[in-house]
Amino acid sequence: MSLRNRDGGEGGAGKITRRGLILTAAQLGFMGLLAARLRYLQVTEAEEFRLLAEENRINIRLLPPARGLIFDRDGRPIAENQQNYRIVVVRENAGDVAAILDRLSRLIPLGPEDHAAALKELKRRSAFVPVTVAEHLTWEQVASVSANAPALPGVSAEVGLSRHYPRDRDFAHIVGYVGRVTENDLNREDDQDPLLQIPKFQIGKTGVELKAERLLRGFAGTRRIEVNALGRVMREIDRKEGKSGTDLHLTVDSALQNYLMARMDGQSASAVVMDVKEGDLLAIGSTPSFDPNKFVTGISVADYKALNDDPFIPLSSKSVLGTYPPGSTFKMMVALAALEDGVIAPDETVTCRGYHELGNQRFHCWKRGGHGRVNLKDSLKQSCDVYYYEVAQRVGIEKISAMAARFGLGERHDLPLNGIASGLLPTKEWKERVIGEPWRIGDSLNAGIGQGFVLASPLQLATMAARIASGRAVVPKLLRAVDGVQTIVAEAAPLGIASSSLAAVREGMFAVSNETGGTAYSTRIAEKSMRLAGKTGTSQVRRITESERRQGIVRNEDLPWERRDHALFVCYAPVDNPRYAVSVVIEHGGGGSAFAAPVARDIMLEALYAGPPPPEAYPASQRTRISNERKKLNLRSEGA
Amino acid sequence: MSYLVHNLKTVPTGFRKVLYLNWALILLILAVVGIGLMMLYSVAGGHFDPWASAQAKRFAVGFVVMLGVAFVPIYFWRNIAGLAYVVSLLLLVAVELVGSVNMGAQRWINLGFIQLQPSELMKVTLVMALAAYYDWLDTGRLSRPAWVAVPLLLIAVPMALVLKQPDLGTALLLGLGGTAVMFLAGVSWIYFAVAIVSGGGLVTAVFLSRGTGWQLLKDYQYRRIDTFLDPSSDPLGAGYHITQSKIALGSGGWGGRGFMQGTQSRLNFLPEKQTDFIFTTLAEEMGFIGGISLLSLYGLIILFCFASAIANKDRFGSLLTFGLATTFFLFFAVNMSMVMGLAPVVGVPLPLVSYGGTAMLVLLMAFGLIQSAHIHRPR
């Protein structure tokens, strides 16, 4: 190194100092910028970033609440939650997943399809996510898996809750059933509960399960867990238990319901038992029925097809959804309308010659020879049609329909059930609007005997009978208590109908079942304190019935069942102090007196005695036959 | 009197050199490394393995190397500066030929016992070579175009090699570090003005060339720029680093979550938490106070280097100190800008803190050189 360089260095050093100052100052300035940035991120924006960090880190998992239980009026369970054992596999612990599944299939029912589906799901999910490979297992199956745990790494048993209906088919139409959440359910705007997002969560699909869904479902609990960037659960931070669904007590009596279902077994029929004062529905059933449990676990295609193809329509709740021409059971409405309107007096007679002439048209009575001179009581007792043609013609359709409306016909009663039919009470305005034709007097005559346009459901008929019995506007009721608190209903208001009119109709109904010559005399109750008052009905199958509509059949002489009349019966008992009203409709059953009345009487007695009635309740000649018939019924044995 | 004679009279010799070390600088380095080891311990979930213990060993080796370098007279380093530069350049070329591909970038030579990263070495040897060049160059010729071209070439060749790897961060550090030495040496302002203007032009060209046949940067580099400009555009993809880094930083707040309590880094939301993004862990766990403390320590290191350089009448020593301090500054300035979302994500570690062998070793060598200049400065 030369000295020249050193000398030059002196001058250079000065420059270095100056430029070094500049550079260092610039560096410190930039550090100031960094400090300001740090302060901005960590102090000014700290709150927001901390929130983002929590979102990153904390996952909220929902804890499904236990679904509310459903009981009958005596606290017997109708819908309960059963432990559902399932087998889950964690891929990362299992190693060779296919081999593990093979070994599992020797212990639990695991078909090739399930096997493939489970394998696919396991491959799709992250290695640490437990995948359910089988569920609804028995305790024995779970135990056998647990016993073989050493040979089944990554396999564990879990227990969840699943809906179970211990009463099987009895309440399938009323309580309904639950099922998986569908795409449709998720898209419903009125129900955006995050619980629906839980895989395999069950929600109500029909009946009370559907209508009381919000009560039964309860509220989700939450579990906050810390997850890492891959979603693996590191630890549970805290847990907030949810609120179980609300328990419901229905008004139904499951023993009576069981009897009712068994009594109508084999027929396409429906029946309703109602408390005449409170409106409590003690039993409300429709046969044939189905096992709702099949729908909970997922019904097989074959089973579903069988239910759907059955001409008796097991899936339909005929007691509330089915509407039928009420036939002669409607005559009380016509009579009351006429009595209240003053166009006829109870003692006034009409002569029945077997037909009623209107212009050149003849309206026939069911009795070809005619009933002769009949008053109101006789007209009900013998179900004379001509009397009602005459009366209907006098009082007119508007007043008949208005009277029937006061008895709950044509009204969609508010029950927690889906598909409640409103039936039909025709008016002149209605016919012009819907059918486009003017009302004819003949239409009134048909309506006078409950044919033509008039339609009523078994629920409405039972309500009508209850209102006749009590003289009050009792409203059918299905919910007895919510969460143990009884639903209080104020005493029903009086109908505002002259008691003399009601008495006249009741007298006629009494005669039907208790006087010789009454259409239901043979199905009377012998026990004096329990006697019933009723009315038979036989409605011609003029309209397409519920079952026909579903089948889309053409009338076929080879299928006589389809052509037969519907058999109806409405009644209340005991006549002196009415407690229950019963309606029975047997589709294509034939005559009401021969087919519906015996069923109604049996159900009524079962209700009145709160169990099997003593033989003395029946007329002496029928006791042996009835007790034999009862033995054949497929009744559930009530434990405890 | 020759330079050597002059120095022999005044420069400490033997063990006396220990007394003349810049002890403040050593204490600052120890403090920074201590913070780094703490954070490595923390990100490993409270374990010395796998990072903290390895890093401590490297530091121990590096510290000895630093002292060794420090005790060698500064003129020796000046004399071998050219050689060191050539060797580094050859190693960079070798990386092209035998380097192992790692993390999408070709940066290492596996020498068996150490993964050598020649680009890191080049950061020091380039500054050495430039300082030696300007020490040798007559000040009168400083700004002559021919004499400016030489250092520009010295900078451009390694930069080009590093860019080819590709390692944008290191290329940036080499370019800025080299330019800083030229600036300090007193090259005319005009050149820098021209450089800034043409640099602006280059940036424009880079953006304009995108998608054309003569595209200047790799696609991934463009994507990094894109996500830097708008991290939210791709929060789970390329923008993930920046977004997560800011979340971790910001959630620290004033005082932080507490040592070992950082959730974001522990739960692996942060990428490369032990290397380039370690500052976020510090900021999350120690908060603003912790972050500003580290920044202050770095600032003090810069200031002590500045003081040492100012006091050094030896042109080589002064330039070297300034240049290396600037390189050191560039390390943490680029890294912090990156994790705080002020700069694109380029692979630059946080000096003395990030986990990594070569960087630690090279940085301590650089401080050894600064110490050597400090000890052997003319008095």
Image: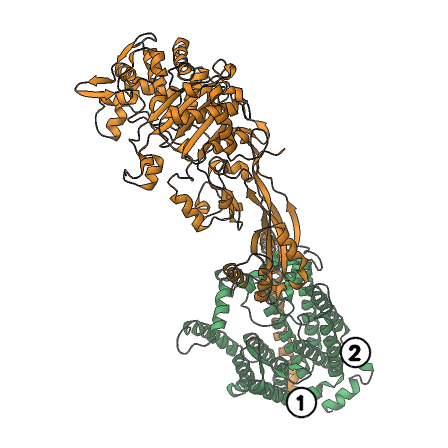
Chain colours: A orange, B green
Q: Between residues B128 and B316, which one lies in front from this camera angle?
A: B128
Circles 2 and 1: CB distance less than 8 Å?
no
In the displayed structure, would residue A584 be above or below residue A100?
above
Quadrant that contains the C terminus of chain A: top right
Percent x, y for residue A308?
40, 44
In the displayed structure, would residue A380 be above or below residue A542?
above
Position of residue A4 in the picture relative to residue B15 (left or right)? left
Q: Between residues B172 and A31, which one lies in front from this camera angle?
A: B172
Tag 1, which chain? B
Q: Quadrant of residue B50?
A: bottom right
As drawn, the label of residue A594 is none
Position of residue A579 in the picture relative to residue B86 (left or right)? left
Give the residue drawn at x 63%, y 86%. B132
Q: Which residue is mark 1?
A: B80
Say whether disc 2 or disc 1 marks the residue closer to the N-terminus: 2
- Residue type, label 2: Tyr
In the displayed structure, would residue A100 be above or below residue B163?
above
Quadrant that contains the N terminus of chain A: bottom right
- Determine if residue B288 is in view: no
Instruction: Choose mark 2 or mark 1, whichever is in front.
Output: 1
Q: Secondary structure at mark 2?
A: helix
Dot 1 alpha-carbon crowd within 10 angstroms: few under 14, some 14 to 19, many 20 or more: some
Q: Secondary structure at mark 1?
A: helix
- Determine if residue B16 is in view: yes
Q: Which residue is mark 2?
A: B20
Percent x, y for residue A545?
33, 34
Position of residue B31 in the picture relative to residue B82 (left or right)? right
Percent x, y for residue B139?
59, 85
Q: How many marks?
A: 2
Cα distance between the residues tagged 2 and 1: 23 Å
